[in-house]
Image (spheres, rainbow, N blue to C red):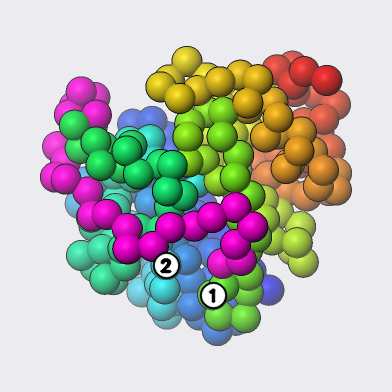
């Protein structure tokens, strides 16, 4: 059974998730921690729970989601796992970060990529990967079918969707991603977003004003 812990980090109020199960192995999704206080907050939770991080993974590589990349690598020896189409964002992330006032070194780069249809395994648990561009190239979502939840990054929010005015953003592509890969899930799936509160697939189908049918 997967346990999910959410942390809200950096000035963009980005959601970082730690997923763990009964084996105490865990994955860190979108580590956006910035500065020593946030880094220690993440590390203290992992240490107090006796968890063993085995992966750091990204829904996409916009700067607010990758601020903790180097810290996670330095602390637990984990290189990022991303979709290959997001590599350009990761490579230029430190330059983009400086535009927003973040002090960043060049990011640690991946040794392997996550592809559409992959199954990510940790402990006794697994997540299905679906490729969901539209907000940014390289955007992926992680689906846990037994526990009925999906981690969407910035693809889908409560009452909103990801912006499409950034480089590689495309509203029509985003709508296609949402309809084909998220709205095909059952209504009671919980949606863990890249920013803001949780929601459900059923709620967004009915209430999200940005969704075009």
Name the residue: 39% across, 62% down: 112
The image quadrant that residue 99 belongs to is top left
Q: Nearer the viewer, residue 141 or 114?
A: 114
**Cα separation between marks 1 and 2:** 8 Å
Q: Secondary structure at mark 2?
A: strand
Sort mark 1 into few (<14), some (14-19) or many (20+) by Cα contacts within 10 Å. many
Does the rendering let one see residue 199? yes
Comparing 151 with 198, the one in front is: 151
Q: Which residue is mark 1?
A: 122
Where is residue 104 drawn, in percent x and y? Answer: 16, 41
**136 left or right of 201 in image:** left
- Which disc is residue 26 wearing? none
| Residue 176 versus residue 189 in the image, above or below | above
Q: Residue 116 colored magenta? A: yes
**Which residue, given by chain and number where applicable, does mark 2 sit on?**
55
Image quadrant holding the C terminus, namely top right
Magenta segment boundaries in residue numbering: 96-120
Please name the residue shown 49% across and 57% down the image: 114
- Could you tell me if residue 102 is visible in this image? no
């Amino acid at each position: 059974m997967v346990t999910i812990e959410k942390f809200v980090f950096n000035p963009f109020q980005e959601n970082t998730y730690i997923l763990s199960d009964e084996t105490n192995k865990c994955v860190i999704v979108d580590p956006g921690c910035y500065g020593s206080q946030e880094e220690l907050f993440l590390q203290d939770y992992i240490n107090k729970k006796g968890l063993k991080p085995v992966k750091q993974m990204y829904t996409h590589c916009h700067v607010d989601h990758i601020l903790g990349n180097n810290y996670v690598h330095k602390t637990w020896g984990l290189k990022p796992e991303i979709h290959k189409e997001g590599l350009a964002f990761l490579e230029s992330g430190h330059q983009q970060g400086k535009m927003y006032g973040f002090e960043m070194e060049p990011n640690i780069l991946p040794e392997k990529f996550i592809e559409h249809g992959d199954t990510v395994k940790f402990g006794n648990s697994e997540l299905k990967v679906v490729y969901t561009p539209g907000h940014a190239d390289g955007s992926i979502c992680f689906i846990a079918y037994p526990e009925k939840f999906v981690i969407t990054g910035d693809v889908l929010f409560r009452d909103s969707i990801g912006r499409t005015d950034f480089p590689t953003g495309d509203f029509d592509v985003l709508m296609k991603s949402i309809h084909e890969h998220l709205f095909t899930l059952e209504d009671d799936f919980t949606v863990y977003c890249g920013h803001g509160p949780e929601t459900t697939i059923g709620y967004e189908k009915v209430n999200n004003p940005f969704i075009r049918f």
